[in-house]
Image (spheres, helix red, strand yellow):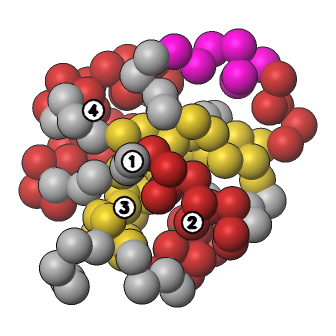
């Protein structure tokens, strides 16, 4: 890892969406993906090991644990981690209503590279 890069952890049940996000993030010289996983519970277990600055978390993650609990556990393990929710365009309105102080912002699927990069940079400022 190059010094000073923003470390991003991608959490999405879909391998396709994880690959798309990872490619977009890794195309920036300012950041890199340090881990990918398909579940919230798995993300909680991996968080300390990979020590990311930002977690990009699918808002509709298929998990036994509710989204709010996943976020709370991530923040408990690493209080300074920023959480960006990845939201399906069709479910945007319902997810926006649930955003609280533990979530920095959200990114709408399908992802646009410049929006993803800008959102990650903004949440680190």
Residue of label 4: 74
Q: Nearer the viewer, mark 3 or mark 4?
A: 3
Residue 37 in view? no
**First along the sequence among labels 2 and 1:** 2
User: Foreground: 95 or 106?
Assistant: 106
Q: Secondary structure at mark 3?
A: strand
Q: CB of mark 3 within 8 Å of CB of mark 4?
A: no
Q: Nearer the viewer, mark 3 or mark 2?
A: 2
User: Foreground: 15 or 25?
Assistant: 25
- Quadrant in the rendering for residue 62: top right
**First along the sequence among labels 4 and 1:** 4
Which range of residues does the magenta coloring cover?
94-100
Image vertical order of residue 115 relative to residue 3, above or below:
above
User: Foreground: 112 or 3?
Assistant: 3
Q: Secondary structure at mark 4?
A: helix
Residue of label 1: 125
**First along the sequence among labels 2 and 4:** 4
Residue of label 2: 117
The CA span between labels 2 and 4 is 22 Å
**First along the sequence among labels 3 and 4:** 3
Horizontal side of residue 78 vs 22, given as left or right = left
User: Foreground: 38 or 83?
Assistant: 83
82 in the magenta segment? no
Q: Nearer the viewer, mark 4 or mark 1?
A: 1
Query: Percent x, y for residue 101?
Result: 45, 17
Q: Nearer the viewer, mark 3 or mark 1?
A: 1
The CA span between labels 3 and 2 is 11 Å
Which residue extends farthest right? Answer: 90
**First along the sequence among labels 3 and 2:** 3
What label sits on residue 8 in the rendered view?
A: 3
96 in the magenta segment? yes
Q: Nearer the viewer, mark 2 or mark 1?
A: 1
């Amino acid at each position: 890892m190059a010094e000073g890069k923003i470390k991003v952890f991608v959490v999405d049940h879909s391998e396709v969406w994880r690959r798309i996000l990872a490619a977009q993030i890794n195309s920036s010289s300012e950041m890199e993906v340090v881990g990918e996983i398909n579940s919230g519970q798995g993300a909680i277990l991996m968080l300390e090991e990979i020590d990311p600055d930002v977690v990009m978390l699918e808002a509709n993650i298929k998990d036994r644990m509710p989204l709010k609990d996943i976020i709370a556990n991530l923040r408990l393990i690493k209080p300074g981690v920023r959480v960006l929710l990845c939201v399906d365009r069709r479910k945007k309105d319902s997810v926006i209503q649930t955003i609280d102080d533990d979530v920095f912002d959200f990114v709408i699927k399908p992802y646009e590279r410049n929006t993803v990069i800008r959102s990650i940079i903004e949440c680190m400022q």
